[in-house]
Amino acid sequence: MTKTVEAVKTVDSKAVKTNIIQNLEYIKASILNDTFKNQRDILKLIINETVEAIKDYKFTFTVNYSTNTFKNHYQVYINHAMKKKASLLADMEEVQRELFTRYGNPKRALKLILNMLNTGLYKTEVIAKINKWVNTTSSPTKTEIIYTK
C-alpha cells in the first residue's frame, strides 16, 4: 500500500516540475523577446504561481545504501536538497524583483532563469553529491527513494 502512495506522489511531483519548467521557459521567452514590460500582470501571476509550486514541490532522489543500519548519509542528502530548494525559491523571488522593480536588471533575471533550467532546478548538484557515495562494505548495494519536505 505504501508503494502505491509513493508512486502517486512521484507522478504529482513530476507534473509540478514540468509546470515549473514551462513557467520558467515562458518567462525566459518574454525577457528574450523584450515583452516582459507589456506582460507585467501575467508574469507576476506566473511567477507567484511558480513560487507556490516550488514550495509544494518535493525533490525525490534515488539513494544507495549497504545495510539498514548504515543510512546516516540520507540526512546529509536531504539537507543538501533542502538547501538547493531554498536557493531555488530565493532565485525566483530575485527574478521577480529584477523584473518588476524600477531599476531592475532583466539580464540578471535571464541569467538566473537559465541557471535554474540548466541545472534541472538545482537537482544536478544534489545528484552529483549523491553519486559520490561509495559502498565500502562487502554487502551488496541497495537503493531507496528519499524525499525532501
Image: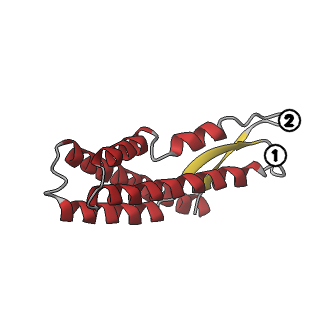
In this view, the residue in front, 64 or 77, is 77
Residue 63, percent from left and from top: 66, 45
The outermost residue toward the front is 103
Q: Position of residue 50 (x, y in %)?
A: 36, 60
SS state under label 1: loop
Q: Is residue 117 above or below residue 89?
A: above
Q: Is residue 99 above or below residue 138?
A: below
Assess whether mark 1 and mark 2 are in contact (beta carbons under 8 angstroms).
Answer: yes
Examine the rendered structure and indicate whether residue 89 appears above or below residue 35: below
- The percent position of residue 84, horizontal first and vertical second, equals 55, 51
Identified at 34% across, 60% down, the residue is 97
Local packing at callout 1 (Cα closer than 10 Å; few below 14, some 14-19, many 20+) is some
Q: Amino acid at mark 2?
A: Thr
Q: In the image, 105: left or right of 41? A: right
Residue under the image location 28 percent in, 56 percent down: 103
The quadrant the N terminus occupies is: bottom right
Q: Nearer the viewer, residue 97 or 133?
A: 97
Q: On the picture, is 57 further left or further right than 29?
A: right
Q: Quadrant of the C terminus?
A: bottom right
Residue drawn at 33 percent across, 59 percent down: 96
Secondary-structure class at tag 2: loop
**Residue type beneath disc 1:** Thr
Q: Residue 53 lies in what quarter of the image?
A: bottom left
- Judging from the image, the colouring scheme is secondary structure
Residue 59: image location, x then y, percent: 53, 54
Residue behind mark 1: 67
Relative horizontal placement of residue 139, taking residue 127 as reference (left or right): right
- Which residue is under mark 2? 137
Cα–Cα span, label 2 and label 1:
9 Å
Q: Is residue 120 left or right of residue 82?
A: left
Q: Tell me where residue 111 sits by quadrant.
A: top left
Residue 59: mark? none
